[in-house]
Image (cartoon, rainbow, N blue to C red):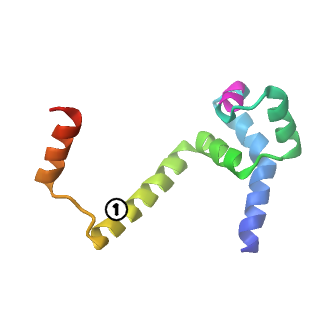
């Protein structure tokens, strides 16, 4: 558990370098976090982004990894749904789609 905390701490300390190396401009991060520029720069200088902000920044900085993690999470949930019997047949699925989208 301690190693996770240490890695997270190192990640936060290096977040500024990750942003500088990214293809995005600082304004993009500011707008994505919905922060005032002064607040953003203060948080960047003091490394005081909260976990929600770090999660948003990580998705922006490493989109492929974020997509992969989301895919793994959804796949695991799908497997649990199958085991629990929460599935719908193809014909029923098509019927629901027609009703929902008026096809």
Which structural element holds mark 1? helix
**Residue 54 placed where, x, y %?**
70, 47
Instruction: Give the left or right position of residue 77, taking residue 39 as reference.
Output: left
Instruction: Give the left or right position of residue 88, taking residue 38 as reference.
Output: left
Label count reads 1
Q: Magenta span has 83?
A: no
Q: On the rendered image, what quadrant is the C terminus found in?
A: top left
Quarter residue 60 falls in: top right
Q: Is residue 77 above or below residue 102?
A: below
Give the residue drawn at x 15%, y 46%.
94
**Residue 89 placed where, x, y %?**
15, 58
Give the residue drawn at x 44%, y 59%.
72
Q: Is residue 11 above or below residue 99?
A: below
Which residue position is annotated with label 1?
A: 78
Quarter residue 38 falls in: top right
What span is colored magenta in the figure?
27-31
């Amino acid at each position: 558990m301690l190693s996770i905390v240490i890695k997270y701490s190192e990640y936060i300390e290096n977040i500024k370098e990750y942003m500088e190396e990214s293809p995005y401009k600082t304004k993009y991060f500011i707008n994505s976090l919905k922060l005032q520029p002064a607040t953003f720069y203060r948080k960047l200088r003091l490394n005081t982004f909260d976990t929600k902000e770090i999660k948003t920044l990580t998705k922006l900085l490493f989109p492929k990894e974020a997509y992969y993690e989301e895919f793994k999470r959804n796949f695991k949930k799908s497997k649990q749904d199958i085991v629990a019997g929460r599935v719908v047949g193809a014909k029923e699925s098509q019927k629901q789609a027609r009703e929902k989208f008026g096809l």
